[in-house]
Structure formats: C-alpha cells, structure tokens
Image (cartoon, rainbow, N blue to C red):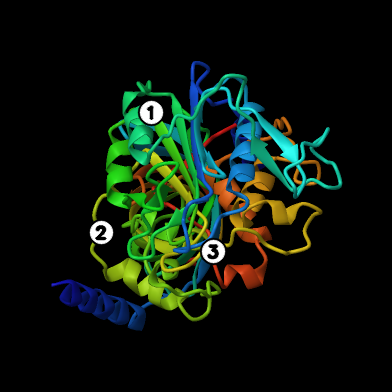
C-alpha cells in the first residue's frame, strides 16, 4: 500500500506542466520566394513559391504579433515588404474574392499603391539578417522557396529583375551568417538539394538520408549498422545548437514544386513539402487560410507530421529532413 | 585495453556463475531526471523495465547483466526548447550486495538512444548506484541513482523501482 501511495504521489507530481515560451519572445519571419521568371531556359519557372510564402506568413501571423520581412520575386518583379499583401488569383491571374474560391490557383503578391520594385538580391537578404538584433529568447524564422543548385545546394535567386544570371548562397555562408545572430533560429528550405543544409549530427549515426539513399525504411537493414556506428564512431560537438533546419529533401534529391497527391482540392497550388509543412502548422489547406491553433507546435512535431503524411511514393523522390541538435524548439 | 577489460569481466562472470545460483530478476522503475544542457538544467520523466536473465548469486552477492528498455518523456520546456520523447535500450553489467533488510548494487550501462525518426541512433553511458530495502522474499523497493553521459545532454536520474525475483 505504501508503495502504491508513493508511486501515485510521484505520478501526480510529474503530470503537472508549465507553459513555456518566454513571454517576452519576439518572432522575426524572413521569407524569400523567387519564381525564377527570368531563368531563360536554364531551368523552369516555379509556379508555387509565392503561394508558399504567402501561406507561411499567414500561418505565422496566427501566432501573434510578428516582425515580417518578405522578399518576393514574381513574374520578373522583385519586391521587399514588411507588410506584404497577397491576393488569391485564378490561373489567368484574375483576382478572386475569397481564398477558397473554386478557381483558386495561387496567391499573388499585390504591391501597394505607389510601391516600386526593390530589385532585391540575396545579398540584401543577408544584410537584413545581419542587421537584426535578437535577444536570447527571440526567434528568427528564415524560409526560402526557390531553386537550389545541384552542385552544393546553394540557394539561387535572380541577380536582378532583368537578368538571366543568378546569385548563389552556399550552405556554409548561410549557416555561418545566421549562427552569429542571437536567439533561436529556424530555417525552412523548400528547394532542390536542400538536404545538404542539414549538418551531419554527431549525436546520431548511420544517417541514411544524407547518403543519397531515397529509401528510409531502415529499421531492419540499417539499424544494426546504426547501433554499431553509435558504439564505435567518434563524435564532435554539434555545431549549431541554436539553429533548427527543416529541409524539403535529403542530399542529392530534387524537390517537387507541386504534388498531385489527391490530399486536398488545392494541393497542386503549393510546393510538395510546404503543403504538408503548412498542414502540420495548422494551416487550412482546404480553405487556403491560416488558422489560429492552441496546441503546442514544435520543430520536431512538424517534421514528424510531414514524414507521417508525406506520400510514400514522394518520399522516395524527396525525403524531408530535420537537423538534429538534441533539443526540440517550441514555436507555439 | 577495452578488450582486455571486457574479457576479464566475462571471465569473472563465468567463474562466478559456476559457483553460484541462478537468480533472474526484473524491475519496473519510474523516475525524475535532471537534464543538464547549455549551463541550465531542467527535469523530465522516465520510466522503464529492466530484466536480467543472466544473473547469478553467491551468498549475499549477485552479478548480473541486465537489459533495460527505458522511455523518456519530453521534458518541461525552458526558454522555448525542450527535450524530445525518446527510447533507450541499455545493456548493463554489474552487481550488488543484499542482506535480509538492505540492498545495494552498482551497474554500468551502455545505452543506445533511439532517434530513428531523425535518422540515427545515439550513444550513452550510464553509471547507476542503487540502494534499497528488501520488502519480502523476491521483492525489493529500490531507489536507483543514475548519471548518464550522453552525447545529447548528461542527466542525473532519481528513480523508484520495484524489483522482483533475484537472490533467494
């Protein structure tokens, strides 16, 4: 009887929980979307990156007052805004009166009256990131929707509105730049080869996703090897303990700009990865609108949702990845 | 050196087992861990089962090589971060002493931390010191104190456990 009482007491102590997110936390959302309108035969225009950006901003806005900075390149126009405005349009870019209109094709950035192009480049984005002063408890979310270079996964943005050349931002440059900022950082990448941004984690081994394997059902085949590696491998300190990264692909994999998975009426309007990312965050993909949610949202929670719901056949093509620094990051 | 120590331990186990009685046991444990990370610490909860089919007793002494399956819940968050739910498989080696009233044991564990969803398996070592009380024959109330050296974060665990079986 005494034992049962002791156990009951312990259980009751453990069952209480605290809330958590620092009250004074400021959230900064910096998003980059480049549709590569001027790629001029070297690739193809990306149809859904602006919609992905708009939806991400809408969903983050449900988390309260946030600081937004959006860099959008759309149909050859390049805008920068802290109060971006997007409108639903049909396939002919005719503006619709509501987000869940049956002819909804995408969100389109709508410049304000008198707003002129900023002609931003990736260097402007880096300059802006470098200007941020983040407190210890603050959160920076950096998202990128666009092309990624095959050779090293670099983010690619058009060099200017009229140019067919592009600027590249390598994983090393991005991570080293962002790691100098304070606070916690979340990087969301929906681009080809973005898995290369996931640093090798000394905390876990036999990471099959980083070896260009597209099959991740490794419980039987690779688990013994993972245990053996865990036992004998030498490990260094994880380099980016305050950066979390969600990538749409593993290394050497391409990302799909859209996915005909039959999961919802507007799935084709979003990037394959971002569609499930948005759902994980609580965004209503059937109505194309952000939804305020109360349940806890963490980076690994998002990742688990995406991995669970991402169609198996698409996982063979692109395997979403997450960095593994040991701790999870609470977003909501 | 590692191989020599391992071989020596196996020899000890073998010799001990030849002159002892077979005494398998199992225990259930529930505890509170203190996680240490980035100059801060915070609590989490763990529970697990442990069993040793390879267990031999000689007079009041026992040596055993248990296997433990341990589940650790996500910890209470701090500064916007939290630990994750995860499971560990631990292989132990050690022994203990008990009389009619008291129990004391020490075990070393090699643990594999299962972060399969994230694409890998982590490694951890743990040292456990367990005082306890003999409640009845084949039933003991134990208070394991464990320090884990993990690549993720070290932790100090205080647990309460019920052990069944063992030395007759």
Marked residue chain, label 2: A
Q: Quadrant of residue A74?
A: top right
Residue at point 24% right, 54% down? A236
- Count up the numbered dots: 3
Where residue A48 sits: x, y (%)? 62, 50
Q: Are marks 1 and 3 on the same chain?
A: no
Residue at point 54% right, 64% down? B26
Q: Residues within 10 Å of mark 3 (few under 14, many from 20)?
A: some
Residue at point 44% right, 47% down? A245
In space, the residues marked 1 and 3 are separated at their CA atoms by: 45 Å
In space, the residues marked 3 and 2 are separated at their CA atoms by: 34 Å
Looking at the image, which is closer to me, A59 or A42? A42
Q: Residues within 10 Å of mark 2 (few under 14, many from 20)?
A: some
Which-is-in-front pick, marks 1 and 2? 1
Residue furthest to the left in view is B1
Residue at point 25% right, 74% down? B9
Q: Residues within 10 Å of mark 1 (few under 14, many from 20)?
A: many
> Which tag, 1 or 2, sits closer to the chain's start?
1
Q: Are marks 1 and 2 on the same chain?
A: yes
Q: Secondary structure at mark 2?
A: loop
On residue B26, which mark appears? Answer: 3
In space, the residues marked 1 and 2 are separated at their CA atoms by: 26 Å
Q: Is residue B86 above or below residue A41?
A: above
**Quarter containing the C terminus of chain A:** top right
Q: Is residue B105 in sight in this rendering?
A: no
Which residue is identified by label 2?
A: A235
On residue A183, which mark appears? Answer: 1
Which-is-in-front pick, marks 1 and 3? 1
Looking at the image, which is closer to me, B110 or B61? B110
Marked residue chain, label 1: A
Q: Are marks 3 and 2 on the same chain?
A: no
């Amino acid at each position: 009887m005494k034992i049962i009482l002791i156990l009951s007491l312990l259980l009751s102590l453990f069952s209480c929980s605290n809330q958590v997110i620092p009250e004074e936390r400021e959230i900064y959302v910096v998003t980059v979307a480049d549709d590569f309108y001027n790629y001029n035969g070297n690739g193809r225009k990306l149809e859904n990156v602006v919609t992905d950006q708009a939806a991400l901003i809408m969903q983050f806005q449900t988390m309260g007052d946030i600081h937004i900075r959006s860099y959008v390149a759309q149909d050859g126009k390049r805008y920068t805004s802290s109060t971006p405005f997007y409108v639903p349009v049909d396939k002919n870019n005719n503006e619709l009166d509501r987000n869940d209109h049956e002819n909804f094709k995408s969100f389109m950035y709508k410049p304000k009256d008198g707003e002129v192009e900023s002609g931003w480049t990736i260097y402007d984005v880096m300059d802006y990131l470098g200007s941020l002063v983040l407190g210890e408890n603050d959160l920076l979310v950096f998202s990128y929707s666009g092309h990624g270079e095959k050779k090293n996964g670099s983010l690619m943005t058009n060099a200017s509105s009229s140019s067919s050349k592009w600027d590249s931002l390598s994983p090393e440059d991005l991570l080293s730049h962002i790691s100098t900022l304070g606070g916690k950082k979340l990087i969301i990448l929906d681009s080809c080869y973005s898995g290369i941004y996931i640093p090798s984690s000394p905390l876990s081994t036999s990471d099959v996703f980083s070896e260009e394997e597209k099959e991740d059902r490794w419980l039987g085949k690779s688990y013994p090897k993972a245990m053996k590696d865990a036992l004998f491998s030498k490990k260094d300190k994880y380099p980016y303990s305050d950066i979390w990264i969600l990538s749409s692909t593993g290394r050497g994999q391409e990302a799909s700009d859209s996915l005909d998975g039959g999961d919802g009426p507007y799935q084709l309007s979003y990037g394959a990865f971002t569609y499930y990312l948005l759902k994980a965050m609580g965004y209503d993909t059937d109505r194309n609108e952000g939804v305020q949610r109360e349940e806890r949202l963490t980076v690994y929670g998002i990742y688990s949702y995406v991995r669970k719901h991402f169609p198996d056949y698409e996982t063979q093509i692109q395997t979403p990845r997450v960095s593994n620094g040991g701790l999870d990051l609470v977003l909501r | 050196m590692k191989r020599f120590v391992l071989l020596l331990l196996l020899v000890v186990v073998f010799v001990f087992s030849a002159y002892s009685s077979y005494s398998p046991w199992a225990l259930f444990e529930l505890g509170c861990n203190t996680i240490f990370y980035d100059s801060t610490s915070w609590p989490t909860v763990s529970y697990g089962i442990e069993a040793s089919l390879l267990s031999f007793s000689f007079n009041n002494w026992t040596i055993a090589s248990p296997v433990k399956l341990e589940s650790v819940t996500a910890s209470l968050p701090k500064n916007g971060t939290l630990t994750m739910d995860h499971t560990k498989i631990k292989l132990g080696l050690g022994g203990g002493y008990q009389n009619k009233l008291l129990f004391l044991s020490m075990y070393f564990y090699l643990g594999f931390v299962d972060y399969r969803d994230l694409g890998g398996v982590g490694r951890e070592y743990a040292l456990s010191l367990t005082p306890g009380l003999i409640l009845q024959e084949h039933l003991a109330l134990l208070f394991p104190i464990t320090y884990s050296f993990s690549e993720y974060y070290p932790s100090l665990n205080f647990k309460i456990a019920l052990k069944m079986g063992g030395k007759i």
